[in-house]
Image (cartoon, rainbow, N blue to C red):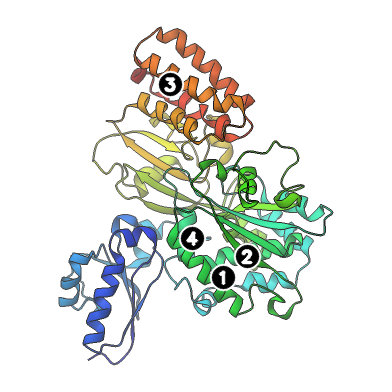
Amino acid sequence: MINETIKLFVPRDTTACSLGSDEVAHRLEQYFDQHEMNIDIVRNGSRGLYWLEPMIEIDSDKGRIAYGPITPEDVDEFIALSCWEINTSHPCYLGSTEEIPYLKKQDRVTFQRVGKIDPLSVSDYQDHGGFVGLVKALDSSSQDLVSCIRESGLRGRGGAAFPTGIKWQTVLDAASDTKYVVCNADEGDSGTFSDRMLMESDPLSLIEGMTIAGLAVGASKGYIYLREEYPLSVKILKKAIVAAKKKNYLGDNLLQSGMNFDIEIRLGAGAYICGEETSMLESIEGKRGEVRPKPPLPAIKGLFGKPTVINNVITFASIPTIIANGASSYQKYGMGKSRGTLPFQLAGNIKHAGLVEIAFGATLRELLFEFGGGTRTGREMRAVQVGGPLGAYLSEESWDTLLDYEAFSKIDAMLGHGGIVGFDDSVDMSTQAKFSMEFCTIESCGKCTPCRIGSVRGLELLEKISNNENAQKNKELLMELCDTMESGSLCAMGGMTPFPVRSALKYFGEDFN
């Protein structure tokens, strides 16, 4: 009989649940209840070591001790060996969670609480530094808040990397009696999951960041535009909003300050184009998701025609720590104009797929091999796509490029949302180039001709090149078409589709012969 209560953590995020963590938690809970054992099961978020999920952690006097992966089939052995008493003989024993090399080598700043706390516990969030930034923000002027974010060097983590402080300053300076804060949580890029992880594992940081943004620019209403394909994120966010309101960290008269800020969730309908900020605004307003011409910028005329701050989940979740600890605390990470950290997501043919938050300045090769461990198949890695379906395909000659916005721009690539998808030497890059054009034909909103028609013609040209139909002439025509799409499209959907196509031809030309 155990006298002292033990905390046993079983992750509850979409990936862990898909691997059986709900059943693991249920079977353990049944056993503990039947044997009247003082063991509390806490449903935390995932640490992001997805090849080890479900990863169970035990709270001990030496810190958290991990076992993984513990699948539903492994529960009986876990129980038989009394692993909550820290049994090092279990084949899935990992030791101290914080000492696992994959985690230990990271710079967990925005994700500092992810996997550590109960996502829906306000007290747990506070015990780990939560709401310190908001309390400080309530005692600061709007200009001081905007200046702090500007000085930190934070840039938008959604892909465009526009300086957050400049965007906020524009909205603050805009003359309007109504302003809005909108979180773009329509995470649709291939190989990306950091937004989902954050919303399911530390949702209060997003709520706090959006609230601080509202105080900074003079907005009292925020919207989270969340993709419908994330049902667990919706459920957790709704509960987190209720929990924050109960403690007066959200809603009317925040902490008796006289300031107000509320958040509403709006679900998307499966359109990739609604990840583009103006299409997203159209969708929130109840219209068809189509790109708006710019100018005017959303910071001047955005949601319902009012000045609007638009950032993604990771950008907003980075705000509380910056405000709590000061701009210099964030500036110390990174290089050049790329300050702070970025949560990179390793996916595709990667041995150790998962989330890696590190400061800008490491190399792509370090991510692929020191963290990712190479390919899952054990074959040679041949190509890597960085930045989602509109990102360039990079061969080994580019893998020593520093993870920095400007460095990637110099090689006609982008970091985007930090998604990295690996391919081994069995990949056909001609097929991947076709996929890029086909993706654009399917997901284009159809508003502008270069995107709507150009992608169709581009796919036709790639088919002809693959069939060796006047290949050289059609390659030249394809490059001209890519130039037209890049310069003539209304948004990045058509404007960046040429990136993966050009790079596939440049680095893997032999696949097109």
Q: Tell me the SS state at disc 3.
A: helix
Question: Quadrant of the rendered structure where residue 420 is?
Answer: top left
Q: Tell me the SS state at disc 1.
A: helix
Q: Residues under labels 2 and 4: Cα distance?
A: 17 Å
Q: Residues under labels 1 and 3: Cα distance?
A: 48 Å
Question: Quadrant of the rendered structure where residue 93 is?
Answer: bottom left
Whichever of labels 1 and 4 marks the residue nearer the N terminus, that label is 4
Residue type at the position of mark 3: Leu
Residue annotated with mark 3: 505
Residue type at the position of mark 1: Ile
Residue type at the position of mark 4: Leu
Residue occupying the point 21% across, 72% down: 88
Whichever of labels 1 and 3 marks the residue nearer the N terminus, that label is 1
Is the residue 280 above or below the residue 181 in the image?
Answer: above
**Residue 285 x %, y %:** 65, 51
- Numbered circle sitting on residue 241: 1
Of badges 2 and 4, nearer the viewer stands: 2
Residue 96 or 422: which is nearer the viewer? 422
